[in-house]
Image (cartoon, helix red, strand yellow):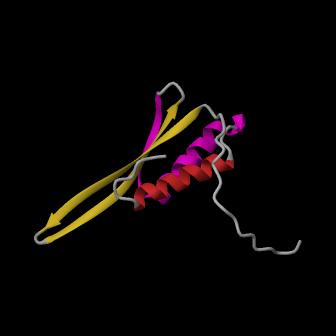
Amino acid sequence: MVWKLLEVDEMDCTMDDCGFYVVINRVAERRADGDYIAEFVKVRADLMTKRNKPIVSFIGTANAVRKHLIKYIADRYRSLGVLSMEHASYIGYELCRAEKTPGYIQD
């Protein structure tokens, strides 16, 4: 196989019909220590059924939440083969965006 570098443009995400979805929120906390104010950011991911019932939630850094959430889904729903790689990639992207973007709103 010969290596290639392919330049790509944006494309829409094709979602699967896996039976659940993830709600992602940015959780920012400001703490003051004398004259110093710091903002600590975490992200929260709520795994939900299509009937809007919560299954499980994770909160932490985007990277930690991504790993735990995808592992949780893979461990419990592997036999169904329901979560596409594209959907998992989209979840990871949204978690990172939530962590880095003040005023984040999920697409």
Q: Report the number of numbered marks.
A: 0
- Counting from the top left corner in percent of width and height, residue 88 is at 61, 49
Along the horizontal axis of the image, is 101 left or right of 89? left
Magenta stretch mostly in which secondary structure? helix
Verify whether residue 65 appears in magenta: yes
Whether residue 67 is visible, yes or no, is no
| Residue 60 position (above or below residue 23) | below
| Residue 81 position (above or below residue 67) | above
- Counting from the top left corner in percent of width and height, residue 59 is at 40, 49
Whether residue 9 is visible, yes or no, is yes
Along the horizontal axis of the image, is 36 left or right of 94? left
- Counting from the top left corner in percent of width and height, residue 52 is at 47, 27
The magenta-colored residue range is 53-81
Verify whether residue 61 appears in magenta: yes
- Counting from the top left corner in percent of width and height, residue 76 is at 61, 37
Name the residue located 82 percent from the left edge and 75 percent from the top edge.
Answer: 3
